[in-house]
């Protein structure tokens, strides 16, 4: 009894010691070869984030999008000294069984967010699950901007201090600026004060002084005045773009863009709110990565222009409400709950160094105001760029993204709304959808008679019929508009979005209860399988476009108008979609094609305009409060309006401008 007991105790201690000393596992990601030690029980997705292996996580790890699929490799990998086996991982819940076909489960496929690691393992990330290097399409559009910056630089010559005149350096500067430039009661940034005496003497009493809003000295540099630089920033849910401008001429000196690193924590706004709301640590994590990203962009554009990052003296930033809160390290949880109130509506000016931004130490960051819970500073950027409030024409401005934002009106009245389009237009929730990365199908045509398809992919100007080496990897947002419009016009789907099951085409397969249409044959793809459109994809497109259309319709009803004079497609994405395809699927009510224009990244342009013109910052604050926000979900006719708008192009509305295209019987 005694012997048995002690043996049992030793085994237990051995086991415990084993656990204590060996709770980390070696994990290798293929094909990149990235590897590292990971704690017992973390998910594969978490491991990939830690090691920088880049796995798609459209739903933010909730186990609903199915985009994070990876394959667990079997066998001994001598190179790494690892015996890799499916036994080293465990399912977290039921999602693996729901979203992965039994055949693939047997082959070792698992959802990386729903699978925990309990041993050494080699993991292969298939092409479609790899975070592609997104093509960032956020060029600055030429705009006529009146230059009137908030920060002005003055060349100041000071009388050196002496025993007879030992006035403080700051007061000396204050007096000189008051006498020469009529700047009264100036204050000085604390960090600038700390270096003031050395700077003044380094410049032999000749300094260049930057003054913010005619109120505060935010930078002092030794010597003669040189150019001043500012950065306009557009923080998008997916991409972040920065435009370095000369504050005196307005010239865009350099543009820098990056994927928003918060993508690793969820692709859409709601996933990010969910993650950041978990606790202070998670919020700080999201804030830290966006600040790091902005510092990187600032460094990159400064480098390109041959200046130092510390010479950037002003920043104006726009972003949707969630991006705005995360940038300011403000908990966004209430944005996700009715009545969706933001922490602040008004614009804010915050010291860059308080936010952790490494630019001129005394510089401010100006964040444009917010219209409503889901209509953020980015929309205000669009507003001050397009100025519908100065026009007689009835203008509909559509900013297409994960969250569709709409503005309708003219100088008499302006309404705005936002609708949850879901990520379908960005390629997510689409069976073979992907982001706008090289290899993504971005343009597509279907012959209405033969139902044959030709397509173009990002990174190649030619059609696949002209260049046989083109290998498609999936379908991106702009391609998705074409897919729906072309399938509808070719009679592959009907106006209700259903597959025409009597279709005779080798591209149409009526299996799996719902049918699928082949866009690219396996030999034309780089993913080793056919790229298809399934019924669920069409439904996702209908839901997204229906949300946009009904938003516009409800606002038209509110204004009591029957017709829109002009449609403006804002957002970088709007420049790449085919206007005709967007009209055919019914993204917006009828409008003459020549009056539908794409204006590029108007939100980013709005940030640039506010950077270069102080008056526009005031205008933004005033207009953001004048636009009347329409909450669609509480509108009594929303359900009917939405149901009507699910139809291609619409159940009741007429489209005289599209008569030459649409099937006549309908
Ligand atoms: S299912 Fe894993 S990230 Fe969406």
Image: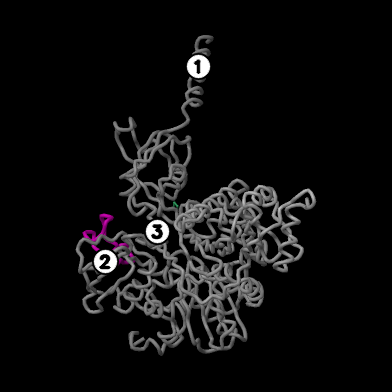
Q: Is residue 444 magenta?
A: no
Q: Residues within 10 Å of mark 2 (few under 14, many from 20)?
A: some
User: Position of 63 compared to 483: left or right?
Assistant: right
Q: Position of residue 413 (x, y in %)?
A: 62, 84
Quote the CA–CA distance across marks 3 and 2. 31 Å
Q: Are marks 3 and 2 in contact (CB under 8 Å)?
A: no
Indicate if the residue with disc 2 has its beta carbon within 8 Å of ligand 1. no
Q: Looking at this view, is 5 or 533 the one in front?
A: 533
Mark 1 secondary-structure assignment? helix
Bounds of the magenta span?
A: 510-531
Check disc 3 and report the residue beneath it.
134
The tag on residue 487 is: none
Indicate if the residue with disc 1 has its beta carbon within 8 Å of ligand 1. no
Q: Residues within 10 Å of mark 3 (few under 14, many from 20)?
A: some
Q: Position of residue 305 (x, y in %)?
A: 46, 59
Check disc 1 and report the residue beneath it.
8
Q: Looking at this view, is 80 or 58 the one in front?
A: 80
Q: Position of residue 201 (x, y in %)?
A: 65, 49
Check disc 2 and report the residue beneath it.
509
Quote the CA–CA distance across marks 1 and 2. 62 Å
Name the residue rendered at 48%, 30% in the picture: 23
Q: Looking at this view, is 274 or 625 the one in front?
A: 625
Residue positioned most to the right? 164
User: Position of 184 compared to 618: left or right?
Assistant: right
Name the residue rendered at 33%, 72% in the picture: 499
């Amino acid at each position: 009894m005694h012997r048995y007991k002690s043996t049992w105790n030793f085994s237990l201690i051995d086991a415990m010691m084993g656990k204590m000393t060996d709770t980390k596992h070696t994990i290798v990601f293929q094909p990149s070869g990235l590897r590292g030690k990971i704690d017992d029980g973390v998910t594969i997705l978490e491991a990939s984030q830690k090691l920088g292996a880049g796995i798609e996580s459209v739903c933010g790890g909730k186990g609903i999008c199915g985009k994070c699929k990876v394959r667990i490799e079997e066998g001994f990998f001598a190179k790494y000294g690892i015996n890799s086996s499916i036994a080293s991982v465990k399912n977290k819940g039921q999602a693996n069984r729901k979203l992965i076909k039994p055949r693939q489960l047997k082959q070792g496929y698992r959802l990386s967010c729903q699978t925990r690691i309990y041993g050494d393992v080699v993991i292969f990330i298939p092409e479609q699950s790899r975070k592609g290097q997104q093509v960032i399409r956020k060029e600055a559009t030429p705009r006529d901007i009146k230059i009137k910056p908030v920060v002005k630089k003055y060349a100041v010559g000071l009388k050196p201090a002496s025993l007879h005149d030992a006035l403080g350096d700051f007061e000396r500067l204050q007096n000189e600026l008051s006498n020469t430039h009529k700047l009264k009661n100036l204050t000085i940034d604390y960090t600038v004060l700390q270096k003031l005496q050395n700077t003044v003497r380094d410049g032999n009493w000749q300094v260049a002084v930057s003054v913010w809003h005619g109120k505060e000295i935010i930078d002092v540099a030794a010597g003669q005045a040189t150019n001043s630089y500012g950065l306009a920033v557009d923080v998008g849910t997916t991409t972040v773009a920065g435009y370095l401008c000369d504050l005196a001429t307005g010239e865009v000196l350099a543009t820098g863009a990056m994927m928003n690193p918060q993508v690793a924590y969820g692709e859409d706004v709601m996933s990010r709110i969910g993650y950041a709301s978990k606790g202070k640590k998670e919020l700080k994590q999201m804030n830290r990565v966006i600040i790091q990203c902005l510092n990187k962009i600032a460094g990159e554009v400064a480098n390109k222009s041959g200046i130092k990052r510390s010479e950037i003296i002003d920043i104006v930033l726009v972003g949707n409400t969630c991006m705005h809160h995360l940038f300011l390290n403000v908990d966004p949880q209430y944005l996700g709950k009715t009545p969706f109130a933001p922490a602040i509506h008004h614009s804010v000016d915050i010291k860059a160094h308080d936010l952790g931004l490494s630019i001129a130490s005394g510089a401010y960051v100006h964040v444009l105001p917010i219209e409503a819970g889901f209509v953020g500073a980015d929309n205000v950027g669009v507003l001050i760029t397009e100025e519908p409030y100065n026009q007689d024409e009835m203008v509909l401005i559509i900013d297409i993204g994960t969250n569709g934002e709409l503005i309708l009106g003219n100088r008499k009245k302006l309404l705005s709304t936002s609708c949850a389009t879901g990520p379908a237009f960005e390629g997510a929730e689409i069976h073979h959808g992907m982001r706008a990365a090289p290899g993504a199908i971005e343009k597509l045509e279907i012959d209405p008679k033969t139902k044959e398809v030709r397509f173009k992919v990002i990174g190649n100007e030619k059609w696949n019929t002209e260049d046989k080496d083109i290998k498609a990897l999936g379908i991106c947002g702009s391609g998705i508009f074409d897919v729906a419009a072309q399938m509808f016009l070719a009679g592959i789907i009907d106006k209700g979005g259903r597959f025409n099951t009597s279709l005779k085409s080798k591209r149409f397969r009526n299996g799996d209860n719902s049918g699928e249409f082949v866009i690219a044959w396996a030999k034309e793809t780089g993913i080793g399988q056919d790229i298809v459109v399934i019924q669920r994809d069409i439904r996702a497109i209908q839901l997204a476009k229906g949300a946009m259309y009904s938003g516009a319709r409800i606002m038209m009803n509110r204004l009591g108008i029957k017709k829109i004079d002009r449609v403006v497609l804002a957002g970088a994405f709007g420049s790449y979609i085919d206007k005709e395809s967007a009209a055919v699927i019914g993204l917006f009510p009828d409008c003459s094609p020549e009056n539908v224009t794409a204006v590029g990244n108007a939100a980013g342009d709005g940030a640039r305009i506010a950077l270069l013109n102080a008056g526009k910052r005031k205008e933004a604050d005033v207009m953001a409060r004048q636009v009347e926000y329409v909450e669609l979900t509480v509108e009594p006719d929303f359900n009917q309006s939405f149901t009507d708008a699910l139809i291609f192009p619409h159940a009741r509305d007429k489209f005289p401008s599209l008569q030459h295209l649409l099937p006549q019987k309908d």
